[in-house]
Structures are given as structure tokens and as C-alpha cells.
Image (cartoon, helix red, strand yellow):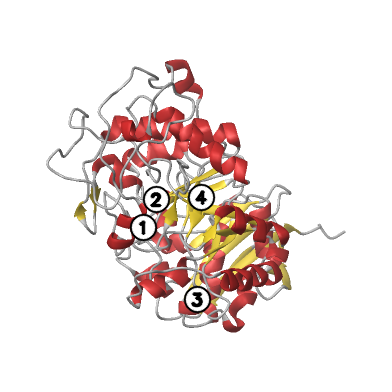
Amino acid sequence: MKYNLLLLIALILVVLPAKGHVIDGEGAPSSSTNQRLSANHSLRAPLYWSVYEHCWLKEKAGEQHIDITQAQWDSIINWVATNLKPYGYEMICTDGFIPMLAENGAPYMTRYGSITLKELIKKCKAKGLKVGVYDNPLWIHGDDSVHVRGTKDVTIGDLRYRSSDKVLHKDTTDRWFSWVVATRPGAKAYIDGFFKHYHDLGVDFIRMDFLSWYEDGFDRNMGRVGRGYGRDSYQLALQYICEAARKYGVFTSLVMPHLYEKAMLEARYGNMIRVVADTGDGGWKHFSAAHRGQFFPTWPNYDNMFDGFIYWSSLSGRDKIILDGDFTRLNTFANANEMESVISLQLLAGGPIAVADRPSSIGNRVSFYQNKELLRLNKERFVGKPLSVDHHDVRSQIWAGKLTDGSWIIGFFNREDTPQVRQIDFRQLGLKGKWHIRDMWKHTDERPDEAYQVTLAPHACKVIHLTKAMKSR
């Protein structure tokens, strides 16, 4: 996810010499299990706050030891509890950048920089907030000598790569990370223990990153970055992850996946998948402009959120995989039109809102995160679709979907730099007669009609709620 963390992650994931013995043990889930196994897709997309912007800006400034102090955590937690929690944002989530440490012989992460996970969870719980954790069950944090729970005598060192393992690039070493090899005896038990560890701490959201690096050791922006453990090993890892996540009730966010074969594996085994490059500096570029209309066959498939949502909308829907547009930094957008657009599209597409603005950078923009009418869509697990999946078709800038009460939501977007007209005849949606129309940003009602047309300013949007008009006597 972040490409400038070499020194820091090298400290986090320090590699110790691998031990020499292998034992016979578990294999892949049985074929009958494989046929049944899939993630729980009845969950709604999370609304939460992330440390991303805080860390991203410190890294850009060249800081080598990024952290969040206890006093900063207290300030952040209070701000989220006051300004976001009443609107449904119920979680604070960690991210990369900050050391992720396994202490005192623990096999999994126990400390995030200067605060233990237990301390962070306690602070958040006191304010009615949950904690989500950025971590990957295929990353090794603990010492090689630590025993893997649920096995006879497997240690963490037994899970590391060996020259006898089948990989795609034997002449390449893994950059930054030391991976658990999913085909190794004990890997399933290790992954199960990972999810039990977080479940026991009270964590039910894991954001797991750099999946493309494990699958084939390739990154579009960085080239070859590792050995690549292959499609079969990747699938096996996702199966183990899915099985353990379901067992312990943990939501899995899959980040940096290649999404090969139309995301066949990720859509089955994960709860949510990233569909765009990292937020980075954010703004309209990340939301709509970067390499607009250009698909790439490897991670990241799209460099802007709007294109990612359009293309992958074929996978989303109620009780299907959730599409993730990455973090939102409202302070990087130029005006209210752009801010309304980025919030609206994510909610219309059924995605999460991951607030990354800091209390010190949000200014007077927090109200854009607090639109209760739009946030109702998240609560009801609404998922809309574009009228066209062709990025060059203006209809891809009109999104629509039906709520469980029979009413409809339509969003009109203008991705252009000039004013544009957007229009729809409600019959295109199979709707007959006149419908009541409500503007979900202005919170005002308009006259009933059978169609709708609006002229949008550059980068603006309009979201309307349609309810059936009663026939006059």
C-alpha cells in the first residue's frame, strides 16, 4: 500500500534464520469444504476513521520514526466519538507506517508503535468505538522459535520460505515482508491463531495489504517485488483466511489484490476488495482524473476511484463483495461540489467511507461526512449501479438502485471540467407514472415527475430519492 516504508517495515518484519525441520501436517481444505466455503456477504460496508493521513504526511516530510502519542490518541478518539460516531462511524483503524510489534514471545502483533493494542482498544471502548487493525495473517511478526498454536511442534520459523518451495521467481528475494508460505504444514493453524488473537482482543475488522506481492511478486508501479508464491498458494491462503474469519466473526478487507480472473478468488473469499490505487495526496485526481478510462491488468487496475467503481460494479450487489474506494481526505478537494461527489459515489456504490482527515485538517468540512439521508444507504446495505459500464459513455456517470422499501436512489455526476446536463426518464428503470423527488444534499422536496434533468457545475453531483406519488382522485 505504501511504497516508501522499506526501512520501517524492515524493522517491523525482521527476518530471523529459518529452522530446518518440516513436519507432516494439514493440507488444503477438503474438496467438499472448498465447494461450500465463501465469506459472509451479508455484512454492510464499514464507516470508520483511519490514521492514514497522519502517517502519510509524516512520511512525505521525511520522518523516520512515525508514531501517535497517547495524548494524540486521546484527542483523536474524542474527536471521532463526538463528530463521527453519532452518524454511524463506529471504528478507528490502524494502518501501515507505524511499527507493528509482537512482544514477549507473542506470535502476533501486540503493540502499535508506542501503544499496546490492548490500551488502544480500551481507550476506544470507553468512548463506544471499535478498533480495526491493519495487519496480514501471512506476515510474520514473531520470533522464529515461537510455537504455532494448534500444532504438535511447528514453529514460526517452519512457515518461512525454503529453497524447496515452489515459487515463480527463485532468483528474487521478498521485499519488505517475510511471508507465511500457505502450503507449509502449520500455515492453516497459524492463520487460525491470527484471527483468534484479534477476536480475543475484541477486534472484528482486519485490513490486509500487499496481496498481489504474495500471489506473483509483481507490482505495476514497482515491478518485481518478491518470489511470488503462485495462484494455487494464494488461493489456499485465501481459503484459510476465509475459514478462520468466518469462525471468529472477523470482517476481511482485501487490499492490493491483482483481481485476476475478474476477482474470482477475492470476491468469493473476502468481505471487501480495494478497486483503486492508494489515496495518497487524494483530491479530484484520485477520485476521477488519474489515468481516466485506463484499465491495467495488474494491481492497481485503476488509478482513480470512479473508474474502479464503474468497472467492478459487475461484482457488487446486496449479499455480494463490497467495493472499497480507499481513504477519503476531504481537505484535499477544491470545493463543496467535489466533496459531495466523493461522498455520494462511495455510498451509492455500496462502499465504505474511511475518513482520513485529521481533527487539525478537517476544518469546517466535517458536515459532508454527516449527511444522515445519504448515510441511511449504508445502514440499509444499498448498492447502486451505473447505467453503463463503459467509461466513455455519459450514462456511467448516472447511478441508480432500489431500496428495500421500493423507493429509488439516483445519483447524477459530472466528471468534466465544464457544466454538463444529466437526465433520465424513469421508465428506463422500469418505473411508471410520477414519483416524488427529494434532493438528498439540500434536504428539500421537488415537484413529482416522470423524468429528471439537471445541469451540473464542474465536478458536481446531485442525488435524488424517488418515492411513488399517490394518484390524484
**Is residue 221 shown left or right of residue 97?**
left
Q: Secondary structure at mark 2?
A: loop
Q: Which mark is residue 182?
A: none
Q: Three-letter amino acid code at disc 3?
A: Glu
Residue 453 seen: no
Of marks 2 and 3, the one in the foreground: 2
Residue at position x 41%, y 66% in the image: 279
Q: Which mark is residue 338?
A: 3
Which residue in the protein does label 4 denote? 110
Q: CA distance from mark 4 to mark 2?
A: 18 Å
Q: Secondary structure at mark 1?
A: loop
Q: Farthest residue to the front: give it.
A: 104
Residue 99 vs residue 277, the one in the foreground: 99
| Cβ atoms at labels 2 and 1 below 8 Å apart | yes
Residue 429 seen: yes
Of marks 4 and 2, the one in the foreground: 4
Residue at position x 33%, y 20% in the image: 23
Q: Three-letter amino acid code at disc 4?
A: Thr
Q: Judge whether 69 appears above or below 431 on screen.
A: below
Using a 10 Å C-alpha cutoff, classify the residue at mark 3 as few (fewer than 14 neighbours), some (14 to 19) or many (20 or more). many
Q: Secondary structure at mark 3?
A: helix
Which residue in the protein does label 2 denote? 209
Which residue in the protein does label 1 denote? 1
Residue 94 vs residue 461, the one in the foreground: 94
Of marks 3 and 1, the one in the foreground: 1
Using a 10 Å C-alpha cutoff, classify the residue at mark 2 as few (fewer than 14 neighbours), some (14 to 19) or many (20 or more). many
Q: CA distance from mark 3 to mark 1?
A: 25 Å
Q: Three-letter amino acid code at disc 1?
A: Met
Q: Three-letter amino acid code at disc 2?
A: Asp
